[in-house]
Amino acid sequence: MIFRKLYLFILIFLSSLSLEAVEISGTIHYERVHAQHMGESSLLDYSNITQETAKQVMVVAIDRSYNLVDSTFTNDKGIYTLSNIPSNSDVKIRVYAKMEKQNKWDLKVIDNTDSDALYGIEGNFANSGVSNSHRNLTASAYYKNSPPFAILDSIYLAMSRVLDVDSNINFPALKLNWSTNNISSGTYYDGIDKIMLQGDQQGDSDEYDDHIVIHEWGHYFERSFSRADNIGGRHGSGEYLDIRVAFGEGFGNALSAIITDDPIYFDTIGNNGWNMNIEHAIHETPGWFSEASTQRILYDLYDNNSDGADKLSLGFKPIYKTLVNGQRNTPAFTSIFSFITELKKVNPNATAKIDDIVADENIATIEDIYGSNRVSNLEEDSLPLYRELIVDKTIGDICSMNYYGNYNKLDNHKYVRFHINKNDTYPIQIKQSNGKSSDPEFALFKTSPFEKVSINESGKLGIEKASLALTTGDYLLDIYDANKLDKACFSVSVGKVTSIKDSNNSDNNNSDDNNSTDNSTDNSSSTNLTGNHTSVVGFSLPDNLFLATLILLTILFIPLFFIRKELKL
């Protein structure tokens, strides 16, 4: 009887143990392949692989029915603990390339070639037992499991540096598209919520190129917290670029060096990769139009090295504050001019040293956000960068040029500033003054708060017109030629079209096209057009009643005169 009771007690005790939860903990790692630099060439060195901790990634336990048992995230040491695992149950540990923290971040690496499947690694099913246990997992470089975790780790490093100077920041959700099938996808930020990354294992793969990953994340940061007027396109360090492109791309390069504290920016492309020294690269075509000058200026403002003209070490916080405040709200297009102007406002004691760093790039003292008072040996018509226009006064000699290249190079886009004093509908006209073969187009922006009002791209040769409802405030026009002529010059008007010589612009080209008095408007190309109007085609009478009557009488009596003469009346 005693043994029977003891047997029942043991059964009950063991049963109670099987109902208790146990812990499974462990450490998650990934393998990072490092780059080897040989002169200006860089390639991935698979003999130099280190094991790194997978920080802040999602870890789950799955039962044999593939139900979720428990979930958590690793800490900054890659350690996880799952506390609600039933004892004596078969579970396996799965790790996702996903980071999620409420009011902080939401990142995931997905396979854009496989229905956006979420990447991960997992172990085998094993019994949880009746006591706490330990399971480690490592994402392998050999089996191509580690790239998604390497990508996340690069971005987490960037987020951590930002959080160090602003603990209240909340990063918008971001998807990272990576696949070994991304052979010709390119690497870029889409301007919304995705970064596309090359994964060509026989050519250009960017998963271990932390500077490239952080550069693209930098564009996401600009769009989310600062402002990015960068129009994109192909670019290089020795090119004369549109000022918006020069700043945006130079910023991305500099940010990657700042975040990693490594000025060697590299891109491994099979055996044909390359690198450049952000701080000490040869000054090739330095200036306010150069992304290389921008990246050197930004990095010198940050770093602790005092060399040459660089006697300043601001650190990251002043740069960050300028980006999210002054640069974000500047009424000019974002450029080195707007950034340095705003940086000096909040760091007045460092003005002289900032100017010295800027001057080392052949850039004269920056006095305002518009880059006023520039003197250089650039092509004629490159300066001034911004032209000012008064409503109802036409200006001329606004010339787009392709001397330095197409689309996003210096002088491809011309900027015009104007102010609206009264809420109304205004006709805007861009008309070619040196022929009729260009395709003038324009984008209109209101500057406070800075927002795009309209893009006007009708495709009409020689002229672009629109009638737009505008409210009181300052505006910027971005004017360009879609046909990419070597040089296309335009007259520009907001409101009435007037003779240029009557618009206090007698120094401009007074050709027949510039003296046009065509006040008709055309809404066919406007993406944000309000208010109705009638296009005038053919002959139109003047508004003055006397002149209109005189013209009509002349038209009537001249034919009668010739008829009378012919009939010899």
Image (spheres, helix red, strand yellow):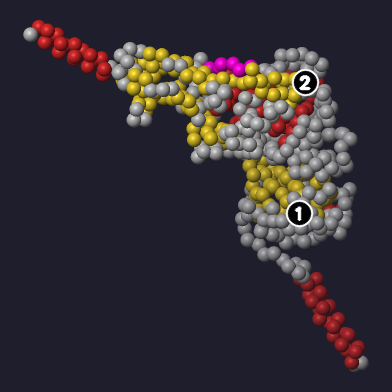
Quarter of the view holding residue 35 = top right
Vertical arrangement, residue 338 with respect to residue 231, above or below? above
> Residue 424 in magenta?
no
Q: Position of residue 280 (x, y in %)?
A: 78, 20
Q: Secondary structure at mark 1?
A: loop
For this view, does 29 lie left or right of residue 249? left
2 and 1 marks in contact (CB < 8 Å): no
Residue at 32 percent of width and 15 percent of height: 129
**Residue segment shown in magenta:** 48-53
> What residue appears at the point 39 percent right and 19 percent down from the top-left corner?
82
Q: Determine whether the residue tagged by mark 2 lies in a helix, strand or loop.
A: loop
Residue 243 visible? The answer is no
Residue 4 at what x, y percent from top left? 11, 10
Which residue occupies the foreground of this view, 378 or 54?
54
Placement of the C terminus among the 4 image quadrants = bottom right
Q: Earlier in the sequence, mark 2 or mark 1?
A: 2
Residue holding disc 1: 439
Q: Nearer the viewer, residue 2 or 185?
A: 2
Say which mark, if any, is on residue 39. 2
Is residue 49 found inside the magenta-colored segment of the image? yes
